[in-house]
Image (spheres, coloured by chain):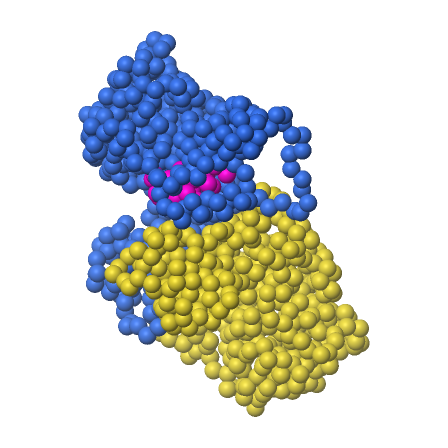
Chain colours: A blue, B yellow
Amino acid sequence: MRFKAELLGIESGGPHIVTLSKDDAYELGVRGGERVKLHFNKKEVYAIVNVVTKSVQKGILGIYDEMMKIEKINEGEYIDVEVAEFPESLHFLQNKLKKRKLNSIEILEIVKDVVRGNLSDTEISAFITALEINGLDVEETTSLTMAMVETGKTLNIGKTPICDKHSIGGVPGDKSTLLIVPIIASAGLTIPKTSSRAITSASGTADRAEVLMPVDLEINEMKYVVEKTNGCIVWGGALELAPADDRFIQIEYPLSIDPLLLPSIMAKKKAVGANYLALDIPTGRGAKVKTIGDAELLAKDFMELGRKLGIKTHSVITFGEQPIGHAIGPALEAKEAWSVLQGDLKIFDLVDKSIHICSLIFGMAGIGVAGLALDILKRGKAEKKMREIIYHQGGNSEIKIDDIKVGTHFLELKSETDGHIMWLNNQILVEISRAAGAPRYKGSGILVHKKLGEKVKKNETILTIVSEKTTQGHNVEKILNEVKPFFIGTSQEIIIHTILDIPQTKKTFIFER
Amino acid sequence: MRFKAELLGIESGGPHIVTLSKDDAYELGVRGGERVKLHFNKKEVYAIVNVVTKSVQKGILGIYDEMMKIEKINEGEYIDVEVAEFPESLHFLQNKLKKRKLNSIEILEIVKDVVRGNLSDTEISAFITALEINGLDVEETTSLTMAMVETGKTLNIGKTPICDKHSIGGVPGDKSTLLIVPIIASAGLTIPKTSSRAITSASGTADRAEVLMPVDLEINEMKYVVEKTNGCIVWGGALELAPADDRFIQIEYPLSIDPLLLPSIMAKKKAVGANYLALDIPTGRGAKVKTIGDAELLAKDFMELGRKLGIKTHSVITFGEQPIGHAIGPALEAKEAWSVLQGDLKIFDLVDKSIHICSLIFGMAGIGVAGLALDILKRGKAEKKMREIIYHQGGNSEIKIDDIKVGTHFLELKSETDGHIMWLNNQILVEISRAAGAPRYKGSGILVHKKLGEKVKKNETILTIVSEKTTQGHNVEKILNEVKPFFIGTSQEIIIHTILDIPQTKKTFIFER
């Protein structure tokens, strides 16, 4: 049957949807939720049907935004519609439910159909759940990674080697990328860094960098910046490096599973042409990875996949039980990173972590002597390089530290006793930062004045909670009535937790990818 | 934020969806595909957000049909909307992904949220996939069944015992329910039979019965018929006996899995108050269950679950390698059943199967002597009872066999050789019947003149394909160019099939439920 396209101007947030009038749907023999095949411009595409039950003209095919954009459909265009058989990729996907191994051709077909919107949320969810429960072997993981690269854009810098770093995240206040990129770039190595925005955290690297410069670059703009400066810090979301992952993560997130973590991360590294990758795995109570054993296994998986993809990968397991540095929240963190670039090396954990990761990269690339990274930082070369990057990304390269504006409403949390900081709760610190407005309000966040093991006196300020608006302060107070972000004591308490009711697991955060 | 409801008149075919303008969505902090919580009339309900990107008034909340119906939302009603936390049932569901056992309270919460539309397709799909891969134990199966009953309507006939029968389907032409219900009812036992329409088959019992009388009854109408006649044959779809199953089956179908088969079937039996159930498991090549061993295992599962639910269940494994009787298609089958009710007992397999299942039920109920069922049939008591049921369901109780109209376009398939019928392919017979117009065109279908093992002569008619429209005959011819519905030979061929390319599994049919 032939229809006329009408652009509905509705975003479904994922699958390709078309609407049909009730009569047309009956005549075609489809019901809401079923699949049709569209023919136009010599293309064949699938879509899920929603049925318009209100009075509506016959012969109209309503088009949702996602489909309009990907398939470039115009208002009034004629489209032939028929009931669809199931796409072939659905049969492959069903085999994974039966614990069968998928080959690279089958995986590519599935990923292509994910990107084209040919598979419904229901079907992708079943696939992801089956991957989570039945697992993927190294070959399947490699095929998935390559399929994600193949169905996306790639960055082609005519240079070698291309260096990269990645943290699986989970530790608040980790602004080390803002130091690592300029250090690596000023040593003459190429580092086209893509980062994510916060989803469940207080700040992503893209949020931090955005305080200093635009990060919403397109792939050609990114290429230009890297060609000019050897580096960049851009948001990965607009680059379409592995567009399948946008659908995957949307489905994984509510389910709290991430079987596609490795392919997702490594596909984006492969897509920018990385040869050397330094991987940071923050570990410990309050981090995503709890034990060193688990961190080692994760590192092994990354390194194996890296080998298959031709990306030499070195990993570093870092202490993840408290924030990095003293600042949490986009602007507060950008400011802290800036102070380090300007030579303030007192923030030991941040400097140490950044330097160590730079040394890993220098080691893989076979350049530099011990102390090169610190030297670059001390001599102000990293600051100079960062200003170049800011300039080419379209920011103010003359920026001074006081230009970085932070919130002006403060709430101070003081110690009620003498003692030592026994623990800081990352998750609660993130919750407080978000209540204070981060990451949307860039100036909101927390300043952590005392860290693990530090001696404190009664009435000494431990945390300053910074917010842009008064109401945000109220939100924070509500949380503080319920939970404590730190504990001060003289010795570790032996009782950790008493369980009186069936405990509910609560979602906390997702791995950065 | 407060919104005004606008009824969109769109059926999504499942989940509860609302639309927000782009600005409103940004202000609320939600994106397409994410979840919001609606407050109105002292109710709290969840919905998935679609974002309207076209010019649209702020403050308008678009409501899809499913939500409007279930939550009874009126045009212009004020609704408060906030970003939703994940529903608690999602955490329970996640535990099943981790292979943990679910208790009855958790399962009830999940099923409630499925019915209320609080869980998205993505989430339900993950749940079903996890059930498929990780399995359910007897307690979980029982809890799921009871949760499906609890969240639906129930039939309360003030009598005992209530009898029921069920076939898992898969064999074309099985019209035995049209005989069993009047036989059981005329013996004084109560049998409130609900049936399904064809989804992938040529005809469901509801389609067959609809040739004789209305089957779209509501639960109170059904109750009335059963009170008057001891029996009924109604479509289960409008009764809301286990509404969760409508969502489950929609998601299971494209995935070709059915971990909820047992709870789904048994919930509907429990909801009509069944005490005795006769379960028919057609078995063999070309049936859903291929081997007697598999059929026995399935019977065991049903009987165990039946015991937990207080439904005494006896099973019968029947030969499923060819159609039952000679007719396939709603009207052709109704006509064949009617001829048996009028005393034509030559259709041996159909009569034998019906009588046997009736005897099983009589045995459980402890009534009757050997031969009671056949006696009821022979003496015309079943026909009389069927006319009563037809009358109370609103059909023509004076119906004559020639009133049952069938298609007038015929295509005869003749034998090209002397020999015996070596096989009939159920699946291809269904495909042909559907191409001929069944089940939508009730008069279309197939007459099977010769069955397994029967001797045939060259040029003798094996099949007559009946269709209502000429074009349907053309569709059938296309299929016949590609596949053969039967094989005539003198001995079984030793080579079954040669495999030259990687075989693709193709969806064939689903279990009746």
Q: Is the C terminus of chain B in the top left, top right, bottom left or bottom right quadrant?
A: bottom right
Residue A191, image quadrant: top left
| View extreme (front): residue | A459
Q: Which residues are magenta?
A: A424-445
B442, A126: nearer the viewer: A126
Q: Quadrant of residue B9?
A: bottom left
Q: Is residue A435 magenta?
A: yes
Q: Quadrant of the N terminus of chain B?
A: bottom left
**Residue B20 visible here:** yes
Q: Position of residue B89 (x, y in %)?
A: 56, 53
Is residue B166 toward the left or the right of residue A347 in the image? right
Residue A416 x, y percent position in the rendering? 56, 33
How many marks are shown on the rendered structure? 0
Asked whether, in this view, residue A67 is left or right of residue B251, the answer is left
Residue at the (26%, 51%) spot, across then down: A69
Q: Percent x, y for residue B474?
A: 36, 68
Q: Residue at x 36, y 11 (%)?
A: A371
| Residue A144 among magenta residues | no
Q: B182 above or below A274? A: below
Report whether B179 appears left or right of A150.
right
Name the outermost residue toward the top.
A369
Query: Residue A314: where, in percent of width, then height?
Result: 42, 20
Q: Is residue B133 above or below residue B59?
A: above
Q: Nearer the viewer, residue A379 or B502?
A: A379
Q: Is residue B509 visible?
A: no
Name the residue at 51% across, 67% down. Answer: B42
